[in-house]
Image (cartoon, rainbow, N blue to C red):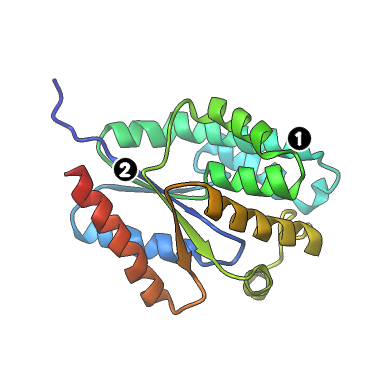
Amino acid sequence: MSNTRRGMLITFEGPDGSGKTTQIAMLEKYFLEKGMEVIRTREPGGTAISEDIRDIILDNKNSEMAPMCEALLYAASRAQLVSEVIKPAINSGKIVLCDRFVESSIVYQGIGRDLGIERIRQINEAAVDGLKADLIFMLFIPYEEGLNRKSLERELDRLENSGEDFHRKVYEGYLKLMSKKPGVIEIDANRDKTTVHLDILKHVEEQMFINL
């Protein structure tokens, strides 16, 4: 029997521009300095197939994409990532840090695109094949601030260009998700990055102690 300890899946959620990429990089550095093996990935993306799907989803020329098409493409990308990267990594004892996971689809497509939370949940239950995150961090920031941060960095993609009403609904969706889903850890992301990192680290170390 193998003595390899199961790894962990830590996911980061939040409105666009909430600082997920920065915090994932800081947490990755923390784990590496402790000699742990870390896989850092993102959604949609993380594999060759999933990155191709990402290009289709986010391309501004695909402005006529139907909401259900969008939802299924996200789920397809996720299914490939889970099968090819996340499950093998966890089973070999690695820490996986993922920029977005199922909760993003629930909020962006289930609420933002009006497809319904339960429909999106069912689609994604099939896509992840029973996999659940060990920690879910919700980095929270007003959506206007997040989009402003993004627009200063680069040209906005198709999802980011979905309009004020869409992003307001997504923001309200995150509020709803935080109030109803147990285990989602809310992090105030409207602070300096070191303070946010230390807040996240406190929860990570608690979880690692529990898993000892």
Q: Secondary structure at mark 1?
A: helix
User: Residue 110: x, y in percent?
Assistant: 69, 42
The outermost residue toward the right is: 64
183 relative to 22, above or below: above
Earlier-in-chain disc, 2 versus 1: 2
Q: Looking at the image, which residue sits at the far front?
A: 180
Which SS class for mark 2? Answer: strand
Q: Residue at x 54, y 48 (%)?
A: 180
Q: Is residue 210 shown above or below 204?
A: above
In three-dimensional space, the C-alpha distance between marks 2 and 1, rounded to whole angstroms, equals 31 Å
Quadrant in which the N terminus is drawn: top left
**Residue 209 to residue 121: above or below:** below
Q: Residue at x 48, y 25 (%)?
A: 129
Q: Which residue is mark 1?
A: 68
Q: Which residue is mark 2?
A: 8
Residue depicted at 58% across the width and 42% down the height = 51
Please name the amino acid that badge 2 sits on: Met
Q: Amino acid at mark 1?
A: Met
Residue 70 appears left or right of 2: right
Say which residue appears at 33% left-offset and 36% top-offset. Answer: 89
Query: How far across and down, in percent of the image, does residue 183 sit?
Result: 42, 48
Residue 202 shows up from this direction: yes
